[in-house]
Image: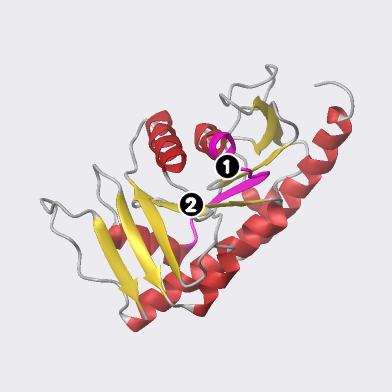
Amino acid sequence: MTGAEPRAHDDQGAELARFSRQLYERGWMPGTAGNLSVRLSDTTALITASGRAKGELIGREVVAVHADSGVEVAPGPLRASAETTIHCAVYGATEARAVIHVHAPYATAVATRVGHPARRRTLRVERLELLKGLGLADPTSAALPVFPNWPDVPRIAADVAGHLAATPDPPPALLITDHGVTTWGRDLAQARDRLECLEAICQLLLLTGGLPPNTPDDAHDDTTDAER
């Protein structure tokens, strides 16, 4: 890191720790689960360290990585989150400056209900007022991708990168089957706000029966619809 980056590293590390503690208190980052990152520059991102309790995270427990690859900028005692490559896939395909991945229960439940172990599916959400909180070009509808939870995380990242590159104006969120939810924005506050809206949307879908029955594994159509 050069120039102003060391100071930005310290400031953004403190912000990542503060947001991690907030999300832990909401029950969305239990134990060491979940990860947050911010983009420091065109080439560098800062992400929470692997294996650190999110409710007790401090500003030093973050790792600088190359934004295009997720490779650590310099060796040290801390390791970058195991899911760094998913954050980098988002940075590479969008204008995002911050990414949040958590295990919020309603979004994770929806991902479990809708997702498939071996192929991407799409959850279409219509008309819910909370869609406006996602900053969509069309605030009345969203097509949310639900990716397989491959054991090889770079494979998930490759799926995400390919989908985002091929999708005009994608919603700033994705789900991973049996795993959790990821959102992004111009900063951590916007990514968090979008996360809150999406978690509330998923809660409403579950409370109102807005999700369709599980699609058979051999179905050809990988799209499901959810309407209020």
Across and down, in percent, residue 120 comes to 30, 47
Label number found at residue 94: 1
The residue indicated by pointer 2 is 170
Across and down, in percent, residue 21 comes to 69, 55
In this picture, residue 209 sits left or right of residue 42 = left
Q: Is residue 96 magenta?
A: yes
Q: Amino acid at mark 2?
A: Pro
Q: Is residue 44 magenta?
A: no
Tell me the quarter of the image containing the C terminus: bottom left
In this picture, residue 110 sits left or right of residue 17 = left
Query: Is the residue marked by circle 2 packed among few (<14), some (14-19), or many (20+) residues within 10 Å?
Result: some
In the rendered structure, which segment of residues is drawn in magenta?
91-104
What SS does tag 1 mark? loop
Across and down, in percent, residue 188 comes to 70, 52
Q: CA distance from mark 2 to mark 1?
A: 9 Å
What SS does tag 2 mark? loop
Q: Is residue 212 visible?
A: yes
Q: Amino acid at mark 1?
A: Thr
Q: Is residue 27 visible?
A: no
Residue pictured at 84% horizontal, 29% vertical: 5
| Labels 2 and 1: the sequence-earlier one | 1
224 is higher (above) or lower (below) than 11: below
Residue pictured at 56% horizontal, 54% vertical: 29
Given residues 189 and 153, the one toward you in this image is 189
Across and down, in percent, residue 210 comes to 32, 77
In this picture, residue 91 sits left or right of residue 222 = right
Question: Residue farthest to the top?
Answer: 75
In this picture, residue 143 sits left or right of residue 189 = left
